[in-house]
Amino acid sequence: MTSGNVFADLGFDNSEEELRKAKLAREIRAVINRRRLTQAKSAQLRAMKQLDISAIVTGRTDKFSIDRPLRCLDRRDNKVDVVARHKPRKSARMAAQAA
C-alpha cells in the first residue's frame, strides 16, 4: 500500500515539499507545451536562466525552494493560489486507508 506520496514512500525527509515542487514542475511543463514554447523562450519570458527552466521541467527541483517554481508560474499568465486545509485526525486517516 502506498501513502499517495511517492517521496514519502521513498523515505524523503521533506516529502510534502518535494511533492508540491513536483506538481508545480508538472504544471510549468504543461504551460510550456500548451504555449509551444522552447525552454529558452520560456526562460526569457520568466526572467530566468534556461538551465533553471530545464531543471524544473525535467523534475530536478532539489536545488530550488518551493518559491522558485511558484514565481515561475506567477510571472506570466498564471494565477497561483495557495490553499491551507486542516489535516484529518490520525484515526480518520487510518480508517480511510484500511477501507
Image (spheres, rainbow, N blue to C red):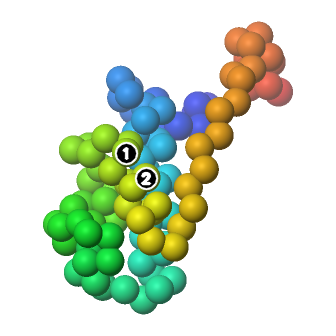
Image quarter for residue 87? top right
Total marks placed: 2
Q: Which residue is mark 1?
A: 67
Image quarter for residue 15? top left
Q: Which residue is mark 2?
A: 70
Neighbor class of circle 1 (other Cα within 10 Å; few <14, some 14-19, many 20+) is few
Provide residue 29's location: percent of width, then percent of height: 42, 70
Give the residue type at disc 2. Leu
**Dot 1: what SS?**
helix
In the picture shown, does residue 46 fall above or below 14?
A: below
Image quarter for residue 78? bottom right
Residue sitting at x 57%, y 62%: 79
Q: Are marks 2 and 1 in contact (CB under 8 Å)?
A: yes
Front residue of 4/18: it is 18
Give the residue type at disc 1. Asp
Q: Which disc, if any, is residue 47?
A: none
Provide residue 27's location: percent of width, then percent of height: 50, 64
Residue sitting at x 37%, y 45%: 67
